[in-house]
Amino acid sequence: ESNLDTVFREEDISSRKFAPWQLVQACAGFGKMYAVIIRPDPKFFKLYRGSYPLLVLTLGILMSVLLSFVVHTVVHRRELMQARLDENTTSLRKTVEMYGRMARNSGTVSLKILQNARFKDVSDSSTAIFGYAPEEMEKLRFFDLYPDSFPPKDMDQVFSLLRNGGEMYTHRHALKRKDGEIRWFISFLEPLVDENTGERFLAVTSTDITTEHNAEVTLRTSENKYKSLVEDMADVIWEIDADSCKFVYMSPALTVATGGLTPEMVIGHAVDEV
């Protein structure tokens, strides 16, 4: 984009103004040059009855008209090219702004984790997602963002990838924003090697999944709540697979009702086997 801003500009010669005597002098000069260099047929002189100055002036006018047409064409084409360049520059800027907004609002940030555990090449979306500008992120170590309340269970795996390399790894974890808010992310860690230094680093793409995580927690809580209600009931509740006619769930009340059968003894068996 910066290269497109550098446009070659020079004075437009079509905007210059000439005095009448300068135009006559220019025409005479062109005509004289044509008469000396091209040397028209002598019969051509007879049309002007040997008037050499008139011939020179006529030829000069013709050459001037031709030159004016060429200059006008060149200037016009240059103006068209400049207009197209300006239009393309404007379109490119709008495209860059659009994709920039998409990246900032997508909830995804890309970055590198170096051997010293610090960030590098952090995308601009970090400001909206983590609350830290890219230059602030590069002063932190990646584990500085992990909250004490939700320490990652696979930290050893992350360090192993950073030091020894390996296959791409999916890392689900919580991070603490600059304002203290806890957000959940799924990160894809790809161990790579810098071609210049030979050092390993992790190419990371992290996506905010806080909404999905909270929904899963709520669903799991509700499931456990209703499961507890069912298991505390005195009535025997079971679930049978429609295709195999086998028990897939049996409430603990079975033991009291039968005087000895447990859910584990029934689950997986067909109805006619119990």
Image (spheres, rainbow, N blue to C red):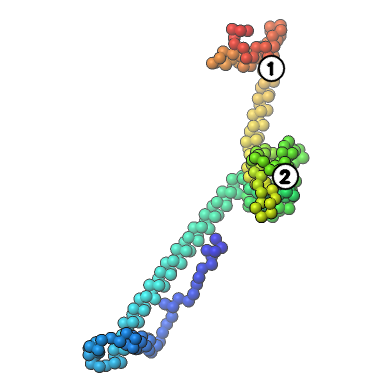
Density class for disc 1 (Cα within 10 Å; few <14, some 14-19, many ≥20) is: some
- Where residue 233 sits in the image (x, y, percent)? 68, 15
Residue at numbered disc 1: 231
Residue 256 occupies quadrant:
top right
Q: Measuring 68% from the left and 14% from the top, which residue is drawn there?
A: 264
Q: Nearer the viewer, residue 38 or 55?
A: 38
Instruction: Give the Cα separation between the discs numbered 2 and 1.
Output: 49 Å
- Where residue 46 sits in the image (x, y, percent)? 22, 90
The answer to whether residue 272 is above or below residue 185 is above
Q: Measuring 71% from the left and 43% from the top, which residue is drawn there?
A: 164
- Where residue 128 sits in the image (x, y, percent)? 64, 49
Q: Amino acid at mark 2?
A: Arg
Residue 168 occupies quadrant:
top right
The answer to whether residue 106 is above or below residue 21 is above
Q: Quadrant of the N terminus?
A: bottom right
Q: Earlier in the sequence, mark 2 or mark 1?
A: 2
Horizontal side, residue 24 vs residue 209: left or right: left
Density class for disc 2 (Cα within 10 Å; few <14, some 14-19, many ≥20) is: some
Q: Is residue 119 visible?
A: no
The answer to whether residue 226 is above or below residue 96 is above
Q: Measuring 72% from the left and 41% from the top, which residue is drawn there?
A: 160
Q: Amino acid at mark 1?
A: Glu
Residue at numbered disc 2: 163
Secondary structure state at the residue bearing disc 2: helix
Asked whether disc 2 touches disc 1, contact meaning CB atoms under 8 Å apart, the reply is no
Q: Quadrant of the C terminus?
A: top right
Label tally: 2
Closer to viewer: mark 2 or mark 1: 2
